[in-house]
Image (cartoon, rainbow, N blue to C red):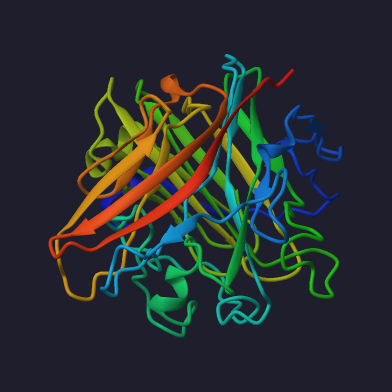
């Protein structure tokens, strides 16, 4: 990370695993305590895509290709749950999407590289995902296998959304510390004979307003890539023990393209790829928002390279889709309920395909 070496500090920190974290809102444990949980009134705060759709589980969208004679097809599936939390000055709630992988995946339980920077490119791609920039076979098998880490891929991964709670300490730092971060134990693909489910990724997307003077620190294993304003800010790639990476926003402001007073995206990509530990620690003075906007990027196969037109039907006020197929709902427009959503994609040859799903919006009170 030559563009702001003074802003990034990487250090080796030995952490010892403790107990298994709970499934709902996860809180930082004390130094000798097991993680504690805050009961979430609505169980739909966590969802997965395994098993028969039901309460708390991911229900795939319904697709309709009857209006098309082309090879157009949907490549994306929406998050059908948007859970937002009541604001609190001393608590930040982040909602990672956890994707489970099988041990047999070519990138999991295959490598033991130590720290390997440069696996992710400096910029996110047009879908807001990391781009593989390493050497195939050294820490990651290929760009194609890396692309699966943070995307929904049928028969390759399954997903579930959880919530973790960052609590402000006496020094004004928001912190979450879990030395046994195994949110998928016994779930989705299961532990596959291990004492924990060790093979998963986590994706966090939120936003913040840059006030000046903020610092973000992560300590954990294995791969961690933090992007601020879609620029790489912390690079802890590779299969390794617990490592720490820190970015000082003031020192890195020029490289990140940020200015005080403006609002920017914060995206964090984590991978647990190897037995036997899973450490996940955040310390930050950045006031990340509890409730980022709902976003869903519609993706459609386009072998004929035809222009597409996107439209959306819903009774949910404020839900919109732009010319590039990005569905958004501002958090301020969220209202609890279940809302049918229908997305239509048409090309200039008269072909139209449709994707329908129910978007469930849940308001959750922490206490």
Give residue 247's position: percent from left, percent from top.
42, 41
The residue lying at 68 percent from left, 53 percent from top is: 53
- Quadrant in the picture for residue 93: top right
Give the side of residue 273 with respect to residue 72, left or right: right
The residue lying at 27 percent from left, 36 percent from top is: 253
- Quadrant in the picture for residue 211: top left
- The C terminus - image quarter: top right
Whether residue 229 appears in this view of the structure is no
The residue lying at 70 percent from left, 22 percent from top is: 366
Q: Of residues 54 and 170, which is closer to you in this image?
A: 54
Give the side of residue 233 with respect to residue 191, left or right: left
Give the side of residue 212 with respect to residue 113, left or right: left
The vertical placement of 279 against 241, above or below, is above
Give residue 343's position: percent from left, percent from top.
36, 48
The residue lying at 49 percent from left, 64 percent from top is: 237
Give residue 98's position: percent from left, percent from top.
61, 54
Give residue 232's position: percent from left, percent from top.
35, 51
Q: Of residues 349 and 14, which is closer to you in this image?
A: 349
Q: Of residues 334 and 137, which is closer to you in this image?
A: 334
The vertical placement of 195 against 85, above or below, is below
Q: Of residues 328 and 141, which is closer to you in this image?
A: 328
Extreme residue toward the front, this view = 66
């Amino acid at each position: 990370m030559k563009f702001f070496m003074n802003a990034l500090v990487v250090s080796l920190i030995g952490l010892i695993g403790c107990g298994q974290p709970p499934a709902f809102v996860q809180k930082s444990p004390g130094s000798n305590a097991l993680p504690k949980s805050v009961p979430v009134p609505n169980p739909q705060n966590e969802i997965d895509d395994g098993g028969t759709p039901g309460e708390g589980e991911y229900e795939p969208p319904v697709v309709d290709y009857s209006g098309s004679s082309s090879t157009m097809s949907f490549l994306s599936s929406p998050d059908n749950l948007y859970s937002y939390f009541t604001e609190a000055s001393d608590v930040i709630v982040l909602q990672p999407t956890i994707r489970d992988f099988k041990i047999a995946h070519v990138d999991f339980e295959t490598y033991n590289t130590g720290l390997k920077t440069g696996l992710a490119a400096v910029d996110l791609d047009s879908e807001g995902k990391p781009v593989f920039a390493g050497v195939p076979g050294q820490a990651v098998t290929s760009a194609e296998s890396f692309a699966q880490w943070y995307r929904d891929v049928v028969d390759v991964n399954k997903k579930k959304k959880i919530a973790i709670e960052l609590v402000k300490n006496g020094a004004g730092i928001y912190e979450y510390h879990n030395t046994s971060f195994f949110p998928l134990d016994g779930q989705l693909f299961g532990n596959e004979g291990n004492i924990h489910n060790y093979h998963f990724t986590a994706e966090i997307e939120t936003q913040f307003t840059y006030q000046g003077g903020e610092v973000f620190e992560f300590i954990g294993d294995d791969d961690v890539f933090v992007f601020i304003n879609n620029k790489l800010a912390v690079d802890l790639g590779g299969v390794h023990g617990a490592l720490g990476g820190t970015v000082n926003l003031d020192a890195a402001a020029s490289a990140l393209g940020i200015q005080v007073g403006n609002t920017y995206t914060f995206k964090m990509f984590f991978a647990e790829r190897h037995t036997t530990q899973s450490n996940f620690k955040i310390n930050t003075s950045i006031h990340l928002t509890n409730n980022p906007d709902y976003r869903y990027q519609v993706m459609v196969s386009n072998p004929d390279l035809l222009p597409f037109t996107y439209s959306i039907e819903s009774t949910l006020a404020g839900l919109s889709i732009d010319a590039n197929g990005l569905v958004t709902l501002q958090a301020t427009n969220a209202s609890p309920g279940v809302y049918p959503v229908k997305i239509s994609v048409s090309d200039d040859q008269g072909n139209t395909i449709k994707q329908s799903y129910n978007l469930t919006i849940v308001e959750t009170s922490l206490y």
